[in-house]
Image: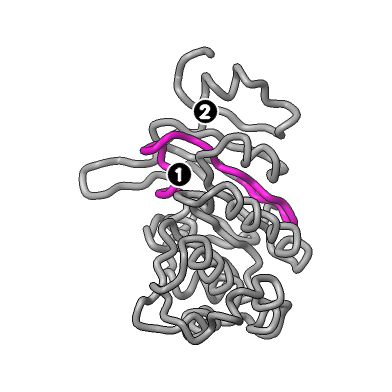
Amino acid sequence: MALVETRGLTAHYGDFQALFGVDLALEEGECVAIIGANGAGKSSLLRSLSGVLRQKPDMIMFEGQPIGALEADDIVALGISMVPEGRRLFPSLSVEENLRIGAYRRRGTGAWDLDAVYAMFPMLKERRTAPGNALSGGQQQMVAIGRALMSNPRVLLCDELSLGLAPVIIRDIYAALPRIREAGSSVIIVEQDIGQALKVADRVYCMMEGKVTLEGTPAELTREAIHKAYFGVAA
């Protein structure tokens, strides 16, 4: 039984359909990457998994239980947290206050608390009293990751971690991923950078126009197959 599974998942924004029958599975301890161009449906998939877009109950399963209709705060309480695209920090709150908000629906005790987050991202401790919007983009991303970890999630959803960041900052952000997995979180990463996704993922799903067009391990997927699944044409 997969830890998280979608079954024929669809998603709509009014009359616009963003997802068409998406089937995806995340096993315990895995890192799954979802790649695809803008508008492929990647963020809609994560919004559905996190409860921001509510669905039919059995379209999303967590440990064999239907959760598709649950609200976002109940999803967090179950053990699924998201690092949203664009960080979405509270600008009127300090770094530490932003982090503490992540523990609002904490699942008992676990590996992550303020000390653990500060140990992973020491610069956040140095800036802990600064407003969230006074940080660089990379530092804000670290706060967003730390905030999600404060709930001690079983599943961490990461939407476009590298978007708009310099390569050296992206390297530092992704260097935290092994520590996060060692602490017990399975991870789903949405990423436009194909090379970065292939480096960190156990399995990769490619999406185009709201559908899964390719799935496999990085070792199984050829450059030509990925290009066709990503763009709809052969390389």
Query: In the rendered image, which residue does mark 2 sit on?
Result: 213
Against 167, residue 235 (above or below) is above
Task: Identify the residue at image location x=60%, y=62%.
Answer: 156
Taking the image as shown, residue 7 lies to the left or right of residue 25, namely left
Q: What's the mark number on residue 200?
A: none
Based on the picture, tell me whether residue 33 belongs to the magenta stretch: yes
Q: Residue at x 55, y 82 (%)?
A: 103
Q: Position of residue 23 (x, y in %)?
A: 54, 40
Range shown magenta: 25-45
Instruction: State the residue position of label 1.
Output: 42
User: Could you tell me how far apart the alpha carbons at marks 1 and 2 are, in whole angstroms?
Assistant: 12 Å
Mark 1: which secondary structure?
helix
Q: Position of residue 36 (x, y in %)?
A: 48, 35
Q: Residue furthest top?
A: 234
Q: Residues within 10 Å of mark 1 (few under 14, many from 20)?
A: many
Judged by depth in the image, the label closer to the viewer, 1 or 2, is 1
Q: Amino acid at mark 2?
A: Thr
Q: Is residue 29 magenta?
A: yes
Determine the image quadrant of residue 208.
top left
Earlier in the chain: of badge 1 and badge 2, it is 1
Where disc 2 sits, the SS reads strand
Image height of 229 relative to 10, above or below: above
Rendered position, 153 above or below 231: below
Closer to the camera, 133 or 103? 133
Q: Position of residue 68 (x, y in %)?
A: 46, 59
* Res. 225 visible in picture: yes
The amino acid type of the residue labelled 1 equals Lys
Q: Residue at x 69, y 71 (%)?
A: 120
Q: Nearer the viewer, residue 196 or 105?
A: 196
